[in-house]
Image (cartoon, rainbow, N blue to C red):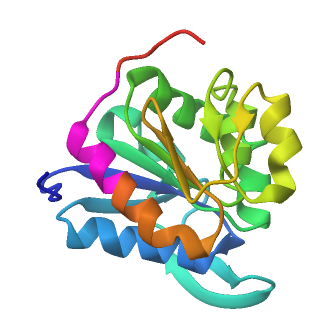
Amino acid sequence: MNNTIQGKNVAILATHGFEESELVSPRDALKAAGAMVHVVSPESGELQAFRHLEKGSKVSVDKTLSEVQAEDYDAIVLPGGLFNPDQLRVNEQALTFVQAFVKAGKPVAAICHGPWILADAGVLKGRKVTSVPNIRKDIENAGATWVDEEVVVERGIVTSRTPKDLEAFNAKLIEEICEGKHERRAA
């Protein structure tokens, strides 16, 4: 399969407290494969990254949630970290944005604590998903089957556990974008 996604637009939804590698690594892999990538956030300016519990670098926001629609993008990435997804999962605008990708059958990729956002968006019922083990119960309570695997793909939703899975996560994300939209099936 050709792993170029030239001309595709991808949103990375984030706010302060994302795990640095879980935003930077997919962003760089997507750009290297030819995609246009925007960091989308509820707020403008710069976002503070973390390297586990220590502050990392800052990343500039390209577009705010109020400036974009899911129709503008071919896929979305939800990086983890503890603080980032915990803030986004209670942001109605962020949840609506994510739901629109799932409803349209567009690829959605979430790593580490990122699937928390999918749980609160109500899009996990009947799906097989992985995540950092700490949120397993939240994933199961959202109606998903949780598994401990490097990367899981279920009807266009790509999930991985931790930064050690980034290579597989990035490859599957690019593969899913190459495949395009997935048919939506009822759970």
Q: Position of residue 84 (x, y in %)?
A: 71, 62
Q: Say which of 159 and 74 sits in front.
A: 159
Q: Name the residue rendered at 69%, 53% in the picture.
A: 148
> Is residue 153 at all visible to an observer of this figure?
yes
* Residue 25 drawn at (x, y percent): 44, 75
x and y, in percent, of residue 74 in the image: 30, 41
Q: Is residue 151 magenta?
A: no
Q: Residue at x 77, y 54 (%)?
A: 87
**Residue 139 at x, y percent in the picture:** 78, 39
Which part of the image, by quadrant, shows the C terminus?
top right
Please state the extent of the stretch shown in magenta in the rendering. 173-182
In which quadrant of the rendered view does residue 47 lie? Answer: bottom right
65 in relation to 52, above or below? above
* Direction from residue 84 to residue 63 in the image, left or right: left
Residue 53 falls left or right of residue 55 = right
Q: Is residue 62 visible to the viewer in this orientation of the structure?
A: no
Tell me the residue at 64%/80% (across/down): 49
The quarter of the displayed image where residue 21 is located? bottom right
Give the quadrant of residue 57. Answer: bottom right
Q: Main secondary structure of the magenta part?
A: helix
Left or right, residue 74 beside residue 113: left
Q: Residue at x 37, y 33 (%)?
A: 106
Horizontally, residue 122 falls left or right of residue 157, namely right
Q: How many marks?
A: 0
Q: Is residue 128 above or below residue 20?
A: above
Most extreme residue toward the top is 186
